[in-house]
Amino acid sequence: MNPADKEERGIKKLKPFEKKLLGIVIALIVITAGFAIFYTIENRSPSGKTLVICTYGGLLSYGSNKNQTYSTVFGTFEKEYGVNIKIVTPSTGCLPALESRKNNEIANIVIGLTNLNGIKAASDGLLVKYTAPENFVNNTLMQEMGSASSYLTPYEYSYLGIDYNKTGQASGQFNPTFNNLLTKQNASNLLMENPTTSDTGEGFLLWEISYYENVLHQNWTTFWSSIKQFDGNNIYDSWSSAFTQFESSSPQTLLVSYLTDPAYNVYFGYGNDVNSTVTQYNGKEYGWRTIYNIGIVNGSGNLSLEKEFVNYFLSPTVQNEIPTNEWMYPANSTIVMPPSYSATMNQSSIIPLNNYISAQEIYNNSESWILQWQSIME
């Protein structure tokens, strides 16, 4: 994916592959009223029906052939249902765009709302209630979405990870706890994202809060008060700027990123020097899982067609494209993962810290938590 940095907070995080894919060519981009409109499908249907999708700019862009992927995903639906698909990518992200145009809908479908902002979208009346057929639904992920699960359906997910260079670790392995992240060497080399501007940063903040409050049973602010003396200029406004620094830094540098990073590197032949892991405590592994969803925009028009598209997006036709184009785990658990994912940490051993903080609690408290973080770090 390749959304602009300022879009990252609005709907979806950036990915660790942005710089390697700047050469991807999009067939046609028209900029109008703050939106990028991607006309991606050839041989468009003459029927006149149009399905407008609001999403992030890099949707399904991180594979070897974006045009082929778009043809498989969107072209197949166009042909089967006799419609035209138009994809809009607001520069501010979909949630702010939908909020600002409540009574003048910009899309039929929204792709990319998360367990960080999904309840807000649902609570603000932006979405239509819809539950996909049971065979398309990942019940574990649905439960983590809380009350938003009546409006949004997960299509992919990933744990955040702490990336490290194997050559920079004495044993080639790094098994962090939040306590050893506070050693002088680790703390001064840990690149993080700002939770006020980055979904990655907010996810790491929630990871830390849940770990401290529910695993260690300690005040979560302790970590930030301790790391502040070492952090220097190691907090970045976006994932992309942090990753750029990680690429050019010493082998001892650590990066808050995504657990699937090693799979991408192996798949495209970039080597396996970089690994990614989660935090540990008493022999158990704890991580933060971010979930991405698809939903129907309220008042958008052809409800039966929109429901069909949601179902279709959860089907194997689309879900098979997720691992090597989004570099996420598909919500559809029947999908066979490509061999490159064997380079990633076994996620089945990870205890999701989301189990301790509900989506409703995030909605109720995230503003307060971020203000507390700012008071410590800024």
Image (cartoon, grey):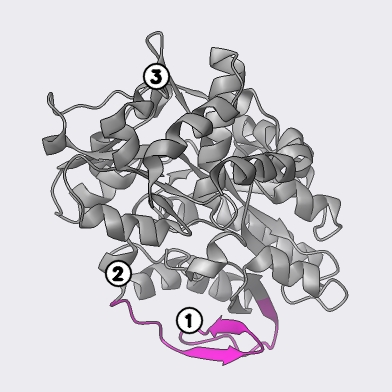
Q: Which amino acid type is marked by label 1? A: Ile
Q: Is residue 329 above or below residue 104?
A: above
Query: What residue do we see at 67% from left, 89% from top?
Result: 33
Secondary structure under the numbered disc 1 in the rendered image = loop
Principal secondary structure, stretch drawn in magenta? loop
Tags 1 and 3 in contact by the CB under 8 Å rule? no
Query: How many tags in the picture?
Result: 3
Query: What residue do we see at 65% from left, 46% from top?
Result: 116
Residue 41 lies in magenta, yes or no? Answer: yes
What separation in Å lies between label 1 and label 3 (alpha carbons)?
A: 46 Å
Query: x, y (%) of residue 270?
Result: 15, 54
Number of other residues with Cα within 10 Å of mark 3, as a class: few under 14, some 14 to 19, many 20 or more: some
Question: Which residue is label 1 attached to?
Answer: 41
Q: Which amino acid type is marked by label 2? A: Leu
For residue 280, the mark is 3
Number of other residues with Cα within 10 Å of mark 2, as a class: few under 14, some 14 to 19, many 20 or more: some
Foreground: disc 1 or disc 3: 3
Question: Which residue is label 2 attached to?
Answer: 21
Residue 87 lies in magenta, yes or no? Answer: no
Secondary structure under the numbered disc 2 in the rendered image = helix
Point out the tag, 1 or 2, that comes first from the N-terminus.
2
Compared across the picture, whether 304 is left or right of 243 comes to right
Residue 206 found in image quarter: top right
Query: x, y (%) of residue 154?
Result: 61, 45
Residue 82 found in image quarter: bottom right
